[in-house]
Image: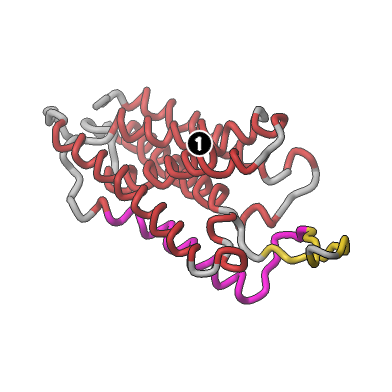
Amino acid sequence: MIQNRQFALAFRAGAFLFAVAGLLKQIGVFNGAISFRSFMYYTIQSNLLTAALFAYLAARTKRSLQTGTRGSAGYHPRLGMICAVDLLVTLMVFWGLLVPQGMSMNYLLSFENIAVHTVTPLLCLTDYILFAEARRLKYRDVYYVCIFPLFYVVFTGIAGLAGYVYGYEGVVSSAFSSHIEFVPIRFPYFFLDFDKLGMMALAFIAGILIFFLIISHCIFLIDRKRPVQTVQRG
């Protein structure tokens, strides 16, 4: 655990600026064509959560420097762990499930993609590793990581069933006809698409939640093994 608050402030301010730059590029601000539909995706919502976390941590660290407070630069380790896991799944689901479905190499190598799907999640994890005090996690915290993704599943499920449309895809109406029908896409990801998968989508959701819990359990077990450092407070 690093207790140098000047370093912590520099890291968190830089991480915040990077996260915001990635978000702005991803939603099209720099291209002059903002896509509000982007806010319906887990990637954007989870990156917004992380940007807010970095902003809070940077402000808290700056305030402690101004007041001369000494001690740990780690604040709310439980929240830091939860955000780190939620963002790690953003990284792993994108590269493990979405990329194999087919994406252009131009997008995969773009700044916005690397930022929101790789670097920002790793920055969130790095902040937790560098600054969080050891053995501050409670076992129940490993289950709190499911709150945000479950909220997202409910949110997108309600939106899709209420008629929200992400786009349209062309499908051949029958095996004996070349007529193409354009079918609305009501769910953000193929593994959440109840229109195509039916109740099988619940199996994907359960599998991803189990993946969340495996990661959070691993972090909890590692935290239990970390040595407790003496923290001077003042």
Q: Position of residue 37 (x, y in %)?
A: 68, 57
Q: Nearer the viewer, residue 234 or 112?
A: 112
Q: What residue appears at the point 37 percent right and 23 percent down from the top-left corner?
A: 7
Magenta segment main secondary structure:
helix
Left or right of 31? Residue 20 is: left
Q: Position of residue 112 (x, y in %)?
A: 64, 35
Above or below: residue 160 compared with residue 72: below
Above or below: residue 157 compared with residue 58: below
Q: Which residue is mark 1?
A: 16
Q: Amino acid at mark 1?
A: Phe
- Crowd tier of the residue under label 1, counting other residues whose Cα lies within 10 Å: few below 14, some 14–19, many 20 or above: many
| In magenta segment, residue 220 | no
| In magenta segment, residue 147 | yes
Above or below: residue 194 compared with residue 9: below
Indicate the quadrant where residue 216 lies: top left
Q: Nearer the viewer, residue 62 or 167?
A: 167
Q: Nearer the viewer, residue 129 or 211?
A: 211
Above or below: residue 14 compared with residue 87: above
Left or right of 138? Residue 37 is: right
As drawn, the residue found furthest toward the bottom would be 162
Q: What residue appears at the point 25 percent right and 39 percent down from the top-left corner?
A: 218
Q: What residue appears at the point 60 percent right and 74 percent down from the top-left corner?
A: 161
Left or right of 102? Residue 223 is: left
Left or right of 39? Residue 90 is: left
Coloration of the structure image: secondary structure
Q: What residue appears at the point 69 percent right and 34 percent down from the top-left corner?
A: 107
At mark 1, the secondary structure is: helix
Which quadrant is the C terminus positioned in?
top left
Q: Position of residue 59 (x, y in %)?
A: 42, 40
Q: Position of residue 21 (x, y in %)?
A: 62, 36
Which quadrant is the N terminus positioned in?
top left
The magenta segment: 143-169
